[in-house]
Image (cartoon, rainbow, N blue to C red):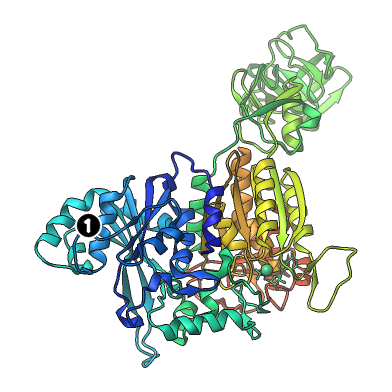
Amino acid sequence: MSVAPIKWKCHISGDSLSLKSRVTGLVLAGGRGTRMGRVDKGLQPFRGSTLVAHVLARLAPQVASVAVNANRNLPQYQAVAGESPVLPDFIDGFAGPLAGLQIGLQFCPTELLLTAPCDSPFFPLDLAERLHAAMEAEGADLAMAVTMERDPEQPDAAPYRQPHPVFSLMKASVLPQLDAYLDTGARRMEGFFKSLRVAEVLFDDSAAFGNINTLEDLQRHERETAAPVASARADADGAAATATSHANAGTPAAGSAPGNSASPAVGRALDSDPAALAVDEAQRLICERVMPVDATETLPLLNALDRVLATDIISPINVPAYDNSAMDGYALRGADLPADGAAPLNFKNIGIAYAGHPFAQAPQQNQCIRIMTGAAIPPGCDTVLPQELATAIDGDNVTIAANAIRAGANLRRAGEDLPQGGVAIAAGKLLRPADLGLIASLGIGEVTVKRKLKVAFFSTGDELRSLGEKLENGCVYDSNRYTLFGMLQRLGCDVIDMGVVRDDPQALEAALRAAARNADAIITSGGVSEGAADYTRDIMALLGDVAFWKLAMRPGRPLAFGKVQTEQDSAWLFGLPGNPVAVMVSFYMFARPALLRMMGANSKLQTMQARATESIRKRPGRTEYQRGIVSTGADGAPQVRLTGAQGSGILSSMTEANCIVVLHHAQANVAAGQMVEVLLFDGLT
Ligand code: AMP
Ligand code: MG
């Protein structure tokens, strides 16, 4: 029997500390198949192989090893499972999923066990990761998937929580409790769960947890796979796009299109997005995981522009090195100035101090020295009278009135800019022209900077054509390659441009492997939205520890983030959406801060407030990024207007804009005249 999907498993090498290495996957296939006319569900043909093979293929990338619980047709299950064990129940008589769980826990060689039923081949590829996160956060013994559903008969009724106990991650140590529960004769999963600390994890994609209960369900799924997806779908970024069709039977992608086959009830649940991740939460999750590179290099100052300083610059001298004059004028002793109410006094000029040519003689009482800006203050002097404040100047005689200045004025003290031994510039600074100047002012000619980050990027999609190629019907030129190149280049990365990769599993796998070999980070565009009719999501998941998020934002709802891991190499992956504006916004909001962190840079996006010249529609509950044009209003204050159409594919409005208007998660409609936050493109490196 062909089990193509499982072959991907052998490519994955586990990082010993990763979650994956701590989890065993268990496929629950031990039921009677009552609703399927008692056929053995797991062995039913499905999209070129069997249901159980599809479930194994989705589990494999998330776990260290797998096992199958089955009670019939064991040789056939063994043929699908390969070297993984097939475990019949310990208790007799088709005692239900808990009996399968019991034998799974008895076998489980790791501290955690993840279960999935054999009739649900669409579950999320980040199931283990998300269940584990909740388990940790809540100190639970077990984490279970939950979705929000609507009753198709009552579309206006409130959605309800649907638990999925067969999709659970649990500690292997719960076995004694399960044994005790089964000893009482009870068999219900929910009943057993009552004896545990359970964390419930809300998944927004209810279709992913759909199961195939009847032969009719199975046939319907088979028909839908075979039929081209001809209708336009609402693109995940919110813009209309036409789904391409693929004959994907027998490939790992076969189980990845639940979005297209969702029932009407499920479709509504997806639209309402109860569990879309907030932008700041995604930013936090990403930045918590990536770490700065350690390697550094020492460069001549002139080569260090736009690099990240690796060690503090300590000032070896006082800056300024000596007390000097802030003005052109007369240096004198403050104690000699005429007292309040006294008559003007004459001072005798005894010499001149120029910058670079100090005057070494100290003045006597009521003597002064002509001094130029930057010249060293002569000995004994502590005050400079600006020349325009002298009441009269007659040859060497300078007349100064009472209260013309106070004693101590117009001096720059040694070390007042930077004291010797102090931190002139802290590590983590992205070196700008002013920084180079400051470092030079300390007499330092070489700096230690972080090594450059290597970032590989490619565009995915069968419809993409590179410049110079003929644009056939239904194709588009690859513009993301150019925006991504520009954004990465400006960030100062070593950019590895991998061009376009077709929606082909082998090509995608080869590209990701090559990228992981050569780069610290990989940026892709396209293919990460749910229901994207291509393989990108599956290959990404199978080659590593990648989470697929649906974000509460617009544009740019889908995002993949995680670590691509091959036998020897690993790299952080940012799977950006395909639409050209969504790519840019997602890059700026998620990839850019993470890359800066990896570069070792302490850099925060600077925003400003501007007055909206027009009202802006905004739905609370998601962050919206709109393209805008900031200008100076009649009152001199900054104002902003939108560029017009905000579709996530409309790149022309991005070139027209000079800023992005950031409308925050909780924010509602903006009235004309209200202040909004804007992010100037000029501020984006
Ligand atoms: P996807 O996320 O792959 O479904 O792509 C979403 C939309 O973005 C589709 O209309 C694609 O044709 C378009 N798209 C994807 N990648 C690119 C690219 N590199 N350049 C221009 N458009 C793209
Ligand atoms: Mg695509």
Q: Quadrant of residue 233?
A: bottom right
Depth order, front residue of 104/133: 104
Type of the residue with mark 1: Arg
Depth order, front residue of 542/1: 1
Q: Quadrant of residue 344?
A: top right
The spot of residue 195 in percent (x, y) is: 16, 60
Q: Quadrant of residue 673?
A: bottom right
Q: Which residue is found at the position 67% from the left and 72% from the top?
A: 648
Depth order, front residue of 231/119: 119
Residue 623 in sight: no
Residue 148 in sight: yes
Q: Is residue 489 left or right of residue 242?
A: right
Q: Is residue 94 left or right of residue 39?
A: left
Q: Is residue 68 left or right of residue 654?
A: left
Q: Is residue 644 left or right of residue 259?
A: right
Number of labelled discs? Answer: 1
Say if 665 sits above or below 389 in the image: below
The spot of residue 55 in percent (x, y) is: 44, 64
Say if 634 sits above or below 109 in the image: below
Depth order, front residue of 480/381: 480
Secondary structure of the residue carrying numbered label 1: loop
The spot of residue 189 in percent (x, y) is: 22, 67
Task: Please name the residue that numbered disc 1 is placed on.
Answer: 197
Q: Which residue is found at the position 23% from the left and 69% from the top?
A: 94
Ligand 1 falls in quadrant: bottom right
